[in-house]
Amino acid sequence: MSLDRALTLHRNYFRVEPKVAVFAPGRINLIGEHTDYNGGFVMPCAIDRGIWVVGRIVDGESKLISDSAGPGKPFDSANTNRKPTGWAKYPAGMAWVLSEPFGLMPNIEATVVSNLPMGSGVSSSAAMELAFAKLFQALGGFEADAKQLALLGQKCENQYVGVNCGIMDQMASACGKKNHAMCIDTRTLEIDYAPVDPSLAVVLLDTKKPRALTDSAYNERRSQCEAAAAAIGVPQLRDANLEMLLAKKSELDEVTFRRGRHVVTEDARSIAFKSALAAKDRNGIFALMKGSHDSLRDDYEVSCPELDAMVNAAWLAPGVFGARMTGAGFGGACVALVEREEVEAFCTSVLPIYKKSTGKDGEAIVCGIDDGARILS
Ligand code: ADP
Ligand code: MG
């Protein structure tokens, strides 16, 4: 168990007992991709993989160790203007954002243990943010609800780490609910929890292609969405639909039009997905997830040959209800919904076909759907 690993690593590295233990999950997004920074709809689940952190308050600088990333740069919670390099930006950034509503955070000694792949589309960064939010909460005793911590995690990532992400990842890691998908309205942050039939398994299909440098492509997509919304005359694409976009087609360049078309149709698919999932409507789920992938590949242009190869194999495999790329794209993973009884046959079918077309060994991980970030002790 990873909590035990965290305790052992902490004792060996710091030669002292930690005081508290916390866990924050990663997330897998069933549908609603690249809609969260457009005020739209998403449908992630928190998964039963994530990040454990154990730690205690110390005098002097904060010190860190991670089983997967090694020692983190020391930082001082009282002087987070001196930003550490590397992964210590996540705890230092959380100390910085939490200090505004809750006062100065203490310095810490903390050990991080994770079973989430980094940069694979399951949001290890949001899990880091929420885990440290919970660690500081456990050590500092302040009151905060899950949504507030999600917003502070996003602020850390946007303003301290410097990644211009939307709110989906932090909401999923903070507010997840066991065996439920979360239909999130990213404008109001309202969550409608939708039970996932236990006969369906959520499978993460990791292409093992590391996500390529995506910052510039991501920022470009964001500006194109803003341009499309401005042309239609709405604050965000969430306020538009396909008809409204089509009416402005002649005023938009071809690429901006396609970016906008992805977002407005993806919002419609996300909303429709909720009832398809509730009814376990196999054709509906398949068509909506395939529609999402096709749109991300052709209109939004954030897929890659590996994601396409994986999803093509998944669409033909036994037991499949639906499959698509998940996460920001340009590498990372696909998500599939699969009849639980056939999950083994599904994985045995997909991975060799993926290997044959890409030369790469992918990995299939059957994910449980879990609760959000929490204090363990
Ligand atoms: P993801 O899609 O997984 O969120 P990001 O690039 O947003 O990818 O975040 C990955 C970054 O988060 C890593 O480069 C590292 O700085 C930090 N991180 C994630 N997991 C860990 C960990 N177990 N230990 C230390 N840092 C981590
Ligand atoms: Mg991330």
Image (cartoon, helix red, strand yellow):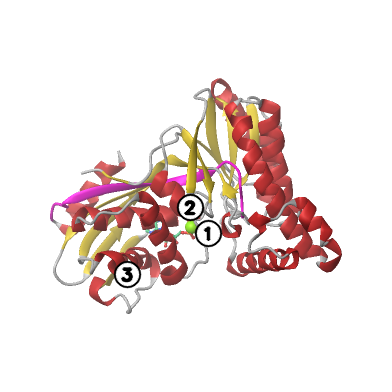
Q: Nearer the viewer, residue 136 or 322?
A: 136
Q: Which residue is mark 1?
A: 166
Judge the density around disc 3: few (<14), some (14-19), many (≥20) Cα neighbours within 10 Å: many
Q: CA distance from mark 3 to mark 2?
A: 20 Å
The yes-or-no answer for disc 3 within 8 Å of ligand 1 is no
What's under tag 2, amino acid-wise?
Answer: Asp
Q: Amino acid at mark 3?
A: Trp
Work out how far the residue at label 1 is from the one at label 2, CA to CA, in angstroms: 8 Å
Examine the image and state in which quarter residue 340 appears.
top right
Q: CA distance from mark 1 to mark 3?
A: 19 Å
Q: Secondary structure at mark 2?
A: helix
The residue pinned by badge 3 equals 96
Q: For mark 1, does the 10 Å Cα neighbourhood hold few (<14), some (14 to 19), or many (20 or more) residues?
A: many
Task: Give SS at disc 1.
Answer: loop
Residue 68 appears in view: no
Mark 2 neighbour class, 10 Å CA radius: few under 14, some 14 to 19, many 20 or more: many
Span colored in magenta: 16-34
Compared with 215, 334 (above or below) is above
Looking at the picture, how far across and down is residue 141, in whole percent?
A: 19, 55
- What residue did someone put label 2 on? 169
Q: Earlier in the sequence, mark 1 or mark 3?
A: 3
